[in-house]
Amino acid sequence: MTLHATDRDLEHIRTLFLQMCVRSESMVRRSVRSVVSRDAELGRAVIQTDVELDRLEVQVDRSCLRCLALRQPVGHDLRFVTTVLKMVVDLERIGDLSVNIAKRGLELSAGAGLQPSLGLVRMGELSADMVRAAADAFVEGDPALGAELRERDAEVDRLNRELVQRWIDVMTAHPSQAERALALTSISRYLERIADHAVNLGQMVVFLVDGRDVRHVP
């Protein structure tokens, strides 16, 4: 069966968007791994991957705007296009934050001393899993799965608070480790922000499927 022009455009947008999801999730996982394993080559690869993610974002934006201008979608199709336009912003920011993590990892790999904790590894796993869950919710059209991300985010927030306090204590007790502790604190905060962006993606899935705006809802 031949697809209508609008359907072809929407499918193209969907494909590009899912490519962004896959790359952003991979960037989170690899950036944390580069820190933990002191793998400078992997860290530089994450930084380079961001170029591809940015290129995809531009492609999605152009495809969405082209669809709006030429196809004038209505109803769910219109909601799909406008929602994807918002969601790619979160995916691009996830990529940027992953780059920041990789850069801090490059700094840490150049010296010795304080090392990443298991809590940081767990934060990385949780944050990457949240990005994957948001993509799954999009694919499956499952608003419940998207809504669940707020609960997962609470654990990431808790770990972030614990780790930041730990590294503050380290800086107080061992001033010579202050620079490394600050780098690890930054990584923890970057992961916390990645989780926040995953929550945003989940909320957009709820809007896409149900038409309910659950942003800023307690």
Image (spheres, rainbow, N blue to C red):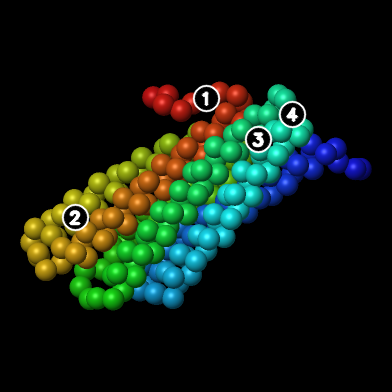
The relative height of residue 165 versus residue 69 in the rendered view (above or below) is below
Q: Considering only order in the chain, which callout, 3 or 2, is on the residue closer to the N terminus?
A: 3
Residue 8 appears left or right of 140: right
Q: Considering only order in the chain, which callout, 3 or 4, is on the residue closer to the N terminus?
A: 4
> Is label 1 or label 4 in front?
4
- Mark linked to residue 166: 2
* Residue depicted at 55% across the width and 44% down the height: 88
Query: Whole-Å distance between the Cαs marked 1 and 4?
Result: 23 Å
Q: Which residue is label 4 attached to?
A: 72
Q: Which residue is label 3 attached to?
A: 81
Q: Where does residue 85 sit, x and y in percent of width and height?
A: 58, 38
Looking at this view, is 126 or 74 the one in front?
74
- Alpha-carbon neighbours of circle 3 within 10 Å: few (<14), some, or many (≥20)? many
Q: Considering only order in the chain, which callout, 4 or 2, is on the residue closer to the N terminus?
A: 4
Q: Which residue is label 1 attached to?
A: 213
- Alpha-carbon neighbours of circle 4 within 10 Å: few (<14), some, or many (≥20)? few
Do residues under tags 1 and 4 come within 8 Å of each other at their CB atoms?
no
Q: Where does residue 174 sit, x and y in percent of width and height?
A: 9, 65
Mark 4: amino acid: Gln
